Amino acid sequence: EDQVTQSPEALRLQEGESSSLNCSYTVSGLRGLFWYRQDPGKGPEFLFTLYSAGEEKEKERLKATLTKKESFLHITAPKPEDSATYLCAVFDNYGQNFVFGPGTRLSVLP
Amino acid sequence: EAGVVQSPRYKIIEKKQPVAFWCNPISGHNTLYWYRQNLGQGPELLIRYENEEAVDDSQLPKDRFSAERLKGVDSTLKIQPAELGDSAVYLCASSRNNNSPLHFGNGTRLTVT
């Protein structure tokens, strides 16, 4: 059975203090790993897709990386508007569905 | 392009009452999903449609939940009768095809009292 865990559960950063969020997964055959951002009262918003180990994607202050067992979302010099819950999800070969992790709740203080 | 539209945004009902949620996906998206999200958790799949066909409803509690997607476009999710444990946010998402990134609506927050 596919499993996705995320750590830490919650993270508080000062503005400008860089850090990383972790997404660990076990899946029968990974077809893609997806990162989403979710603001309170909103649906998740797509950020990145990673398909193979070693792949990296960047968008503004965010950079996502992928290994065979985990993915990291690096946040460089975060701003208060980066505060949100960050979800990762895997899509496998067998189940043909997305399995989401519980998310990391990020707060960036000014 | 217009996003995924869901209604209502909020619903408060008493237990044992019926409730229905509506979703209009992004135009041209063949795959439609209904997810349930509890507080502090990630979305969990209830049902996935490919056009009009429900291709995965293994996680749908069929004794009280039902869904339909008429003409392969809009979809409704119904609960009858609702239980206290059904309180959650119900999210609809669509994608061009399976394995493409999901585009979510803003959800319906259901409170069962």
Image (spheres, coloured by chain):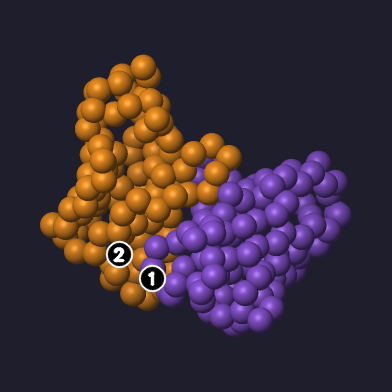
Chain letter for purple, please: B
Residue nearest the observer in this picture, B39 or B49: B49
Q: Identify the disc placed on residue A32.
A: 2
Q: Whole-Å distance between the Cαs marked 1 and 2? A: 8 Å
Image: B47 above or below A107: below
Task: Give the quadrant of the C terminus of chain B.
Answer: top right
Q: Position of residue A34 (x, y in %)?
A: 34, 56
The answer to the question of whether label 1 and label 2 lie on touching residues, with beta carbons closer than 8 A, is yes
Residue nearest the observer in this picture, B56 or B98: B98
Q: Which residue is mark 1?
A: B99
The answer to whether residue A53 shows anywhere in this view is: yes
Q: Position of residue A58 (x, y in %)?
A: 22, 48
The reply, left or right, for residue B106 in relation to residue A48 is: right
Protein chain holding label 1: B
Going by the numbered disc 2, the residue's amino acid type is Gly
Category of crowding for the residue at label 2, using alpha-carbon neighbours closer than 10 angstroms: few (below 14), some (14–19), many (at least 20): some
Protein chain holding label 2: A
Identify the residue at image location x=37%, y=19%: A109
Identify the residue at image location x=30%, y=47%: A23
Do discs 1 and 2 share a chain?
no
Image: A20 above or below B97: above
| Secondary structure at numbered mark 1 | loop
Identify the residue at image location x=29%, y=29%: A78
| Secondary structure at numbered mark 2 | strand
Residue extending furthest top?
Answer: A110
Give the quadrant of residue B26.
bottom right
Chain letter for orange, please: A
Identify the residue at image location x=72%, y=70%: B66
Q: Position of residue B87 (x, y in %)?
A: 70, 46
The reply, left or right, for residue B13 in relation to residue B101 is: right
The answer to whether residue A103 shows anywhere in this view is: no
